[in-house]
Amino acid sequence: MLLEIKNLTKVYKVKAGFFRKKNFYALKDLFLNIYKGEILAIVGESGSGKSTLGKIILRLEKPTEGKVLFRGKDIFTMGKEYTRKVSVVFQDPRTSLNPRMKVGEIVEEPLIVHGEKNRKEKVKEAIAKVNLPFEILERKPLQLSGGQAQRVAIARAIVLNPELIIADEPTASLDVSIQEEILKLFKELNQKGIAFIFITHDIRVVEKIAHRVAVIYSGILMELGKKSEVLKNPLHPYTKFLLNNLPVKHPRERKPVDTLEEEYEIPEKGCPFYPRCPESFEECKKTLRRVEINGRTVACNLY
């Protein structure tokens, strides 16, 4: 096992009126494992807690409760050896690449931080792995296309030969044709042994790249299983909701969105999807069961 997420909870204090604050659970009692060499997709709507999870794994945020273990070690007790093994590719390369630096300097920066030797050769190796020409090393980010810029970001992520990459919506800002190229590159890197946590709201992307899928809503893991099983036979009503409301390829294929128009509050106890769920019943207001069904994890009182 590469990464273990145990009982992970992240609470923020938010305003609830004058001089009052309340707890907002970005993540709640989350359990998740990532295995060596796999691609695990984390899916859910905006605000579901996907990016918060990514930030904690990258040590950009600290959890309120719970632990994240990398090969059995608490990541918050590890030093630079963790950033050598775990890297990141952000959504928009335009904002994640320093516009004042040349591509060669951008890719070389992690090597400098970790005191690596033979840096120029390693930079060229990384650029070759992402299928870019060496002359691009002298350019700056503003001289690159969107696809080239994201490949540079990926080269920077792999230059230290990490075991795990957190990819946070890495194709969301790219044209569809470029998305396909980047997904193909991720699969090639995965075949060379790099594991990925692929954070996305687009289930169609998941279908093309993931081995397993974790569906998160309001910070809670709703469903986890093999991609083929989750997408072809979803068990949780929220997973069904996501699949039923995929963006259509043509406007004439649009159908009414299956959601509530009015504002609703997520219950403090029970299932957070309760106010939107067409299959909910009274028990869902108060409790939420987590069960294992043929190797799949489902948090739902229907089972």
Image (cartoon, helix red, strand yellow):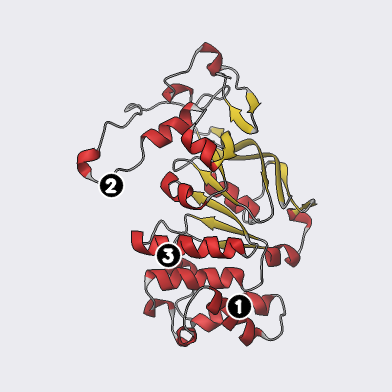
Q: Position of residue 120 (x, y in %)?
A: 62, 87
Q: Quadrant of the C terminus?
A: top right
Mark nearer the viewer, 1 or 2: 2
Q: Nearer the viewer, residue 122 or 82?
A: 122
Q: 234 or 31, which is in the foreground?
A: 234
Label 3 environment density (alpha carbons within 10 Å; few <14, some 14–19, many ≥20): few
Q: Is residue 69 above or below residue 280?
A: below
The local secondary structure at tag 3 comes to helix
> Mark 1: which amino acid?
Glu
Q: Residue at x 41, y 56 (%)?
A: 172
Amino acid type of the residue that numbered disc 3 sits on in the rendered structure: Glu
Residue 176 versus residue 188: which sits nearer the camera?
Answer: 188
Above-or-below relation of 150 to 118: above
- Which label lies toward us, 1 or 3? 3
Residue annotated with mark 1: 109
Residue at 48% of width from left, 71% of height from top?
151
113 sits left or right of 301 in the view: right
Amino acid type at circle 2 is Lys
Residue named by callout 3:
181
Query: Which tag, 1 or 2, sits closer to the chain's start?
Result: 1
- Whether residue 17 can be seen here: no
- Residue 10 in view (yes/no): yes
Q: Would you say 114 lies left or right of 95 here?
A: right
Assign a secondary structure to mark 1: helix
> Residue 223: x and y, percent?
56, 34
